[in-house]
Image (cartoon, grey):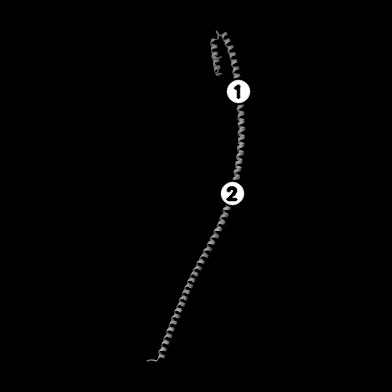
Amino acid sequence: MPPKSTEKGKRAGARKKKRTSGADVEAESKHRLVVLEKELLQDRLALRRDETRRARAAEDQLKQRLQGLEAELEEARSEGKAIYAEMSRQCRALQEEGKARSRQLEEEVRGLREQREACQREAEAAQKEAQQALRERDRTLAQLRAHVADMEAKYEEILHGSLDGLLAKLRAIEPQWDGAALRLHARLKQQLGQFGLNPLDL
């Protein structure tokens, strides 16, 4: 039968060994936890670095895009200013051309009005002259008609007197001069016919 002190020693050694083994497991667990947390932190840091790198790349792209847009905007502004300046120049040129054309048209209208007024004056003067000429013509025609009528009356009176005297002489010498009288009478009829007179109407 072993001594009691030996058994107690074995038990104490077993408990000590058991405590030592439990402490190692706990320390190892803590160590693993620390390692895992470190790896997790490293992974998170790597993700953050990757996100930061992508963010910086996107920011650089945005900056480049913004610079490009600003350059396009500035170019568009320059083109707009140039277009506006050209349109303003063309507008001023058109306005000047319109003013010049308007002045030219006003001068033409004024000249045409003056010509129309001159033509109206000339037409009125020509109308007055024509009316005066017509009145003078009518007056001259009336005078000529009166003169012709007076001449016709005088010629008719002379012819009547001549014919009456001639007929009286013919009656006196009718027996001797029948043939001559007839010839003379025929000649007188012919002459009266030439004057447009009918001896039967006399």
Identify the mark at residue 24; answer none if there is no mark: none
Tag 1: Cα neighbours inside 10 Å, few (<14), some, or many (≥20)? few
- Toward the left, the furthest residue is 1
Q: Nearer the viewer, residue 146 or 93?
A: 93
Q: Secondary structure at mark 2?
A: helix
Q: Nearer the viewer, residue 195 or 178?
A: 195
**Residue 41, x across and y down, in percent:** 48, 74
**Residue 99, x across and y down, in percent:** 60, 47
Residue ID at (54%, 60%)? 73
Residue type indicated by callout 2: Gln
Q: Is residue 63 above or below residue 125?
A: below
Q: Quadrant of residue 2?
A: bottom left
Quadrant containing the N terminus in the rendered view: bottom left
The first of marks 2 and 1 along the sequence is 2
Q: Nearer the viewer, residue 186 or 11?
A: 11
Q: Quadrant of residue 140?
A: top right
> Total number of numbered labels?
2
Q: Which residue is mark 2?
A: 95
Q: Which residue is mark 1?
A: 142
CA gap between label 2 and label 1 equals: 68 Å
Q: Is residue 112 above or below residue 183?
A: below
Q: Is residue 35 left or right of residue 123?
A: left
**Residue 110, x across and y down, in percent:** 61, 41
**Residue 22, x across and y down, in percent:** 43, 82
Residue type indicated by callout 1: Ala
Residue ID at (60%, 17%)? 153
Residue ID at (61%, 35%)? 120
Q: Quadrant of residue 10?
A: bottom left
Q: Is residue 103 above or below residue 51?
A: above
Q: Are marks 2 and 1 in contact (CB under 8 Å)?
A: no
Q: Secondary structure at mark 1?
A: helix
